[in-house]
Image: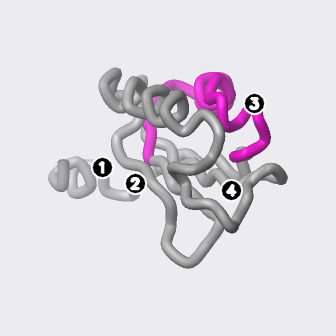
Amino acid sequence: MRKLFAVVNERGPHWDHAKSMEEHADWRAHADFMNGLVAEGFVLLGGPLVGTDDVLLIVRGDSEDEMRGRLAEDVWVAKGLLRQRQIAPHCPSRPSTFLAIY
């Protein structure tokens, strides 16, 4: 059964803090990749966390290995602009209450 996961990515060693997100190499390819994951229903919510180097994604899938594999396909991961820091399954204590917010 598909589960929800919280994924925290961080800016990688090739991130240039002097540039905006859109000024980094392959911005369009990264944006298209992420938009494709949203269109598939894999990514439900995502974006940078203000005041940090972190990016939070809420994703739906079967396993942490699936999360790692799918997100590793991002050109920004391959180029060291982003790296995966943490993947954790969401385990609501009261699923009926949690699902009511969708």
- Which residue does the image show at 68% across and 51% down from the upper left? 86
- Which residue does the image show at 34% across and 21% down from the upper left? 40
- The furthest residue to the bottom: 51
The answer to whether 16 is drawn above or below residue 99 in the figure is: below
Q: Which mark is residue 95?
A: 1
Q: Would residue 28 be found to the left or right of residue 74 on screen? A: left
**Location of residue 100 in the rendering, given as x and y in whole percent from the top left corner:** 16, 52
- Which residue does the image show at 68% across and 56% down from the upper left? 10
Seen from the viewer's position, the closer of residues 76 and 94 is: 76
**Location of residue 59 in the rendering, given as x and y in whole percent from the top left corner:** 45, 39
Which amino acid is tagged 4?
Glu
Seen from the viewer's position, the closer of residues 93 and 6 is: 6
- The furthest residue to the right: 13
Q: Which residue is mark 2?
A: 92
- Residue 77 counted in the magenta span: yes
Q: Which residues are magenta?
A: 58-82
- Which residue does the image show at 83% across and 53% down from the upper left? 13
Mark 2–mark 1 CB contact (< 8 Å): yes
Query: Callout 4: 10 Å neighbours few (<14), some, many (20+)?
Result: many
Q: Which residue is mark 3?
A: 78
Which amino acid is tagged 2?
Pro
Q: In whole angstroms, how far apart are the C-alphas of marks 3 and 4?
A: 13 Å
Q: Which residue is mark 4?
A: 10
